[in-house]
Amino acid sequence: MIDAEVVDRSAITLLHKMVDIVKYTLRTNLFLDDRYSLGLRLDPKLMHSEESDAPRELPYGVVFCHGRRFNGYHVRFRDIARGGMRLVTPASPEQLALEVRRSEERQRQADNANISG
């Protein structure tokens, strides 16, 4: 339906990504009356890309939150993770992608250190 009704390619891509977020949402606090921010627990399969060249480990869990003045996320690779929520205010989509990759790598290293140490 999106492809048939929308002409602009950027808008089509954005709308499909929005549908993906809804499809991959496992749990949300959207319906709570006194929430401080919107929280989404997402299916980690959302992080998998068919277009990626390098195989990547699929996260154990992914949480995204959006508040009035922040966006935050937590990606963990084990059932128990340390480090908490990462808050990101990137200047561009490219910077956001870079920060997400850096954070995933740091979290993976921390999880592996906790297992071995």
Image (cartoon, helix red, strand yellow):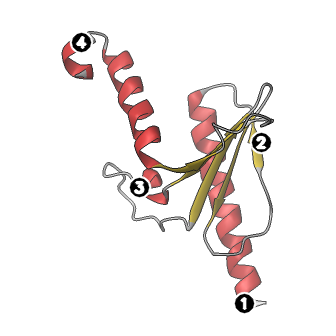
Nearer the viewer's eye, disc 4 or disc 1? 4
Is the C-beta separation of discs 4 and 2 under 8 Å?
Answer: no
Q: Secondary structure at mark 2?
A: strand
Q: Point out the tag, 4 or 2, that comes first from the N-terminus.
A: 4
Q: Point out the tag, 3 or 4, that comes first from the N-terminus.
A: 4
Residue positioned most to the bottom = 116
Image quadrant containing the C terminus? bottom right
Nearer the viewer's eye, disc 4 or disc 2? 4
Q: Which residue carries the number 2 mark?
A: 87
Q: Point out the tag, 3 or 2, that comes first from the N-terminus.
A: 3
Q: Point out the tag, 2 or 1, that comes first from the N-terminus.
A: 2
Q: Which residue carries the number 1 mark?
A: 116
- What is the number of the mark on residue 5? 4
Relative to 96, say whether 73 is above or below: below
Q: Point out the tag, 4 or 1, that comes first from the N-terminus.
A: 4
Q: Secondary structure at mark 1?
A: helix
Relative to 73, say whether 80 is above or below: below
- What is the number of the mark on residue 48? 3
Amino acid type of the residue that numbered disc 3 sits on in the rendered structure:
His
Rounded to the nearest angstrom, the CA distance separating label 4 from label 1 is 53 Å
Rounded to the nearest angstrom, the CA distance separating label 2 from label 1 is 28 Å
